[in-house]
Image: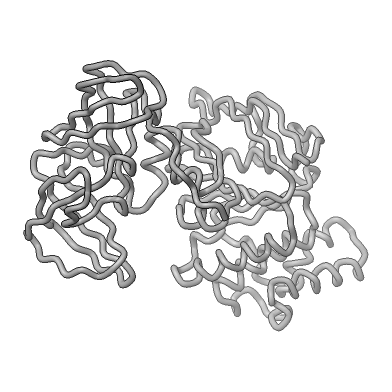
């Protein structure tokens, strides 16, 4: 059953076009995470679903009801904000039951709803405390508990973990995923954090410039981005990009010469190319190999910087004339991710390598033209 459906949603702020023909269908019980760069429209879209922003055009359905022009309180949604938005003079129990009291629900119903939410969120021992007596993680759980007591059709989360430190964010990611499994409710979550998106979502919605670029399961989007924007946005460290030119085409195969002399042959391409056409090669940092003679494509470089992260090593390699592109246009530095600790000295000579099957090729308009890659089944 479809829980939320967005049909040709548009949003204008004067001359600024914030949302452009957004179409999205969310099934009952899904955990959908919306990601994208600052200003892409993800928070605006969430607020439009909540009714905090009016649509300029289009239709919004929640469980089949047209709620496009309804007030937020009549939409069957509950929203959790980044700032917690707790009343400091109220206890935890009073904060969690506030929405039901405003709806004039019986006292026994309010108490039962608060007790149920407190049990789910492990807040039974905190019910008589004030917000100032709680940690950041506990305050966020109270805000979530206030949403749970209302038994909404849809939960909306607007970057709820941004104010927490790294350890608490990790803990709350686990708790939110556990909560979703317990409740089985539809949840729509906005974040700029790729880790939150990849670990919690049943589907990710990638937005850019007010449009949806791609929708899919996290591993599907990571392994098979539809375009260069999605490929570069998902993944930390980000994908390495190198500009190139098609020098030979034979059926669905093509040979590409990259700036700096690197030559790669791609097989079974999706879409047509012509000799002389500009393209971009992409290779993820974890697919680059250091000093591996078995790699089909190899080129020389020198170590510019090494970051030891405990479980992995991030190496930045200066590849000389081989120019990488992207947000840092015109550099010659490749990022390599190694799943172990490897001592490397500044300026030491290394070779980088990869197999063409691990690389991506993007057409001049950004479309991915390499064939889909296998995705592990979970």
Count the labels in the image.
0
Compared across the picture, whether 291 is left or right of 110 comes to left
In the rendered image, residue 118, in percent from the top left (x then y), is placed at 74, 73
Residue 23: name its quadrant. Answer: top right
Considering depth in this image, is 101 or 28 the residue closer to the camera?
Answer: 28
Q: Quadrant of the C terminus?
A: bottom right
If the image is split into quadrants, where does the N terminus sit?
Answer: top right
Relative depth, front residue between 250 and 137: 250
Quarter of the image holding residue 368? Answer: top left
Colour pattern: one colour
Q: Could you tell whether 102 is left or right of 254 in the image?
A: right
Q: Quadrant of residue 248?
A: top left
Closer to the camera, 190 or 272?
Answer: 272
Is residue 293 placed above or below 278 in the rendered structure?
Answer: below
The reply, left or right, for residue 184 in relation to residue 36 is: right
Q: Residue at x 45, y 40 (%)?
A: 224
Q: Is 308 on the left-hand or right-hand side of 49?
A: left
User: Among all residues in the image, which is located at the extreme bottom?
Assistant: 125
Residue 6 in picture, x, y percent from top left: 67, 33
Residue occupying image coordinates x 49% and y 26%: 16
Camera-side residue of 248 and 260:
248
In the figure, 366 relative to 372: above or below?
A: above
Q: Position of residue 24 (x, y in %)?
A: 63, 34
Residue at (49% x, 59% y) in the render: 162
Q: Position of residue 12 (x, y in %)?
A: 56, 26
């Amino acid at each position: 059953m479809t829980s939320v459906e967005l049909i040709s949603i548009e949003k204008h702020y004067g001359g600024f076009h914030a949302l452009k023909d957004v179409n999205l269908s969310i099934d009952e019980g899904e955990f959908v995470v919306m990601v994208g760069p600052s200003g892409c429209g993800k928070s605006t879209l969430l607020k439009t679903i909540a009714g905090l922003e009016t649509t300029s055009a289009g239709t919004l359905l929640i469980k089949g009801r047209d709620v496009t022009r309804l007030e937020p309180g009549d939409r069957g949604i509950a929203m959790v904000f980044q700032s917690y938005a707790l009343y400091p003079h109220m206890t935890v129990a009073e904060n969690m039951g506030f929405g039901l009291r405003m709806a004039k629900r019986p006292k026994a119903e309010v108490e039962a709803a608060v007790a149920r939410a407190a049990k789910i969120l492990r807040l039974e021992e905190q019910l008589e405390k004030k917000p100032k007596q709680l940690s950041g993680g506990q305050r966020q759980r109270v805000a979530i508990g206030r949403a749970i007591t209302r038994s909404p059709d849809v939960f909306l989360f607007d970057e709820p973990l941004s104010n927490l430190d790294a350890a608490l964010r990790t803990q709350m990611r686990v708790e939110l995923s556990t909560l979703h499994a317990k409740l089985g409710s539809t949840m729509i979550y906005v974040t700029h954090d790729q880790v939150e998106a990849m670990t919690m979502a049943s589907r990710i919605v990638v937005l850019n410039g007010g449009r949806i670029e791609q929708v899919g399961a996290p591993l599907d989007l990571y392994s098979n981005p539809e375009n260069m924007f999605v490929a570069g946005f998902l993944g930390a460290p980000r994908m390495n990009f190198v500009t190139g030119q098609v020098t030979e085409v034979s059926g669905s195969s093509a040979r590409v010469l990259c700036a700096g002399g690197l030559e790669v042959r791609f097989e079974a391409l999706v879409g047509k190319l012509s000799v002389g056409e500009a393209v971009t090669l992409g290779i993820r940092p974890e697919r680059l190999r250091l000093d591996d003679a078995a790699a089909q494509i190899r080129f020389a470089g020198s170590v510019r910087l090494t970051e030891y992260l405990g479980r992995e090593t991030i190496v930045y390699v200066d590849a000389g004339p081989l120019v990488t592109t992207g947000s840092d246009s015109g550099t010659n530095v490749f990022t390599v991710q190694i799943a172990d600790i490897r001592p490397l000295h500044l300026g030491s000579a290394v070779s980088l390598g990869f197999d063409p099957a691990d690389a991506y090729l993007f057409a001049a308009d950004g479309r991915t033209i390499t064939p889909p890659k296998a995705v592990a089944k979970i």
